[in-house]
Image (cartoon, rainbow, N blue to C red):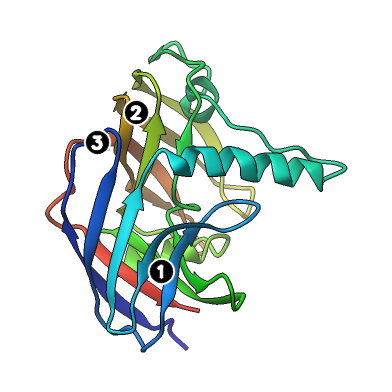
Amino acid sequence: MKTPLYCLLFTISSLGLYAQNTLSGNLSGWEPANAQILTGMNAPIQIGTIAENGAFTIELTKDFVEQTLQGIDGFNENSDDWKASISNVGKAFSCNSETVEIVNSEEPVINVANFGNYGLGNIDERKMYGSFMMVNNQEFGSAFKAFGKYETKKGYYLDWYYFENAASVNGECSMESYALNQEESYMAKNIYELNFKPGWNIVKYEVVEVFEDRDGKTYESVALWKTLDELPPDVQYIYFAK
């Protein structure tokens, strides 16, 4: 059975990537329900709402950063083994290559989506309806959500990153990777064109090229990380029902 998909149409009411961004529009195909747009690692963080008629609003504020840090502290208090922490620019995007130039490598990295996904649910009722992704095609979104099945497709998703101070990562690096059969190999390349400004930044993660092994399994062979000044014209907002 295929996962039900619907398109989200966003109207951007603010793109001044600094203190706050407000996104509003209408969710096509939404079944009547009051719900919240959620993200977060330990406890869900509400970043927006959807009404019964499908009208929604997302607000990206600095409060999200504080809630994220509190969520990590809460997770660590309840974990006896693995401890969570905020990554930094140098760790998140570097592959120890001299061909990658990093500025302000210690700057913390805080992003909104969970692997490109934004949750849709109701916190009080402990209910999840599904999630959505900001992508350029449905096929890519479906394949990305099927992580581990090696059905990688070309395409991109968008995420929002918050920075207190400017930072940048530019260059590319490659490393040999093996197919699932452990007999075929390919060069996996990451290309970085990231120039972060203080405040909110749009980041595009794009699978540019795909390697296919003799068994028909596909892997990302070239990936591009890039900051954008505005939303790309071909972006689609795809809802994946639970």
* 140 relative position to 80: left or right: left
Q: Residue at x 29, y 69 (%)?
A: 56
Expressed as whole percent of the image width and height from the top left, the position of residue 26 reads 22, 73
The residue type indicated by label 3 comes to Leu
Q: Which type of secondary structure does the marked residue at label 2 adopt? A: strand
Q: Which residue is mark 1?
A: 142
The answer, for residue 216, to whether it is visible in the render is no
Does label 2 or label 3 sit earlier along the sequence? 3
Whether label 2 touches label 1, CB < 8 Å:
no
Residue 59 is tagged as: none
Q: Residue at x 62, y 54 (%)?
A: 181
Instruction: Choose between 233 and 38: the one closer to the eye.
Output: 38
- Above/below status of 115 relative to 28: above
Disc 1 crowd rating (10 Å Cα; few below 14, some 14-19, many 20+) is: some
The quarter holding residue 135 reads bottom left
- Above/below status of 158 relative to 197: below
Whether label 2 touches label 3, CB < 8 Å:
no
The quarter holding residue 83 reads top right
The answer, for residue 130, to whether it is visible in the render is yes
Instruction: Choose between 199 and 92: the one closer to the eye.
Output: 199
Q: Which residue is mark 2?
A: 192
Does label 2 or label 1 sit earlier along the sequence? 1
Disc 2 crowd rating (10 Å Cα; few below 14, some 14-19, many 20+) is: many
The residue type indicated by label 2 comes to Tyr
Q: Which residue is mark 3?
A: 17
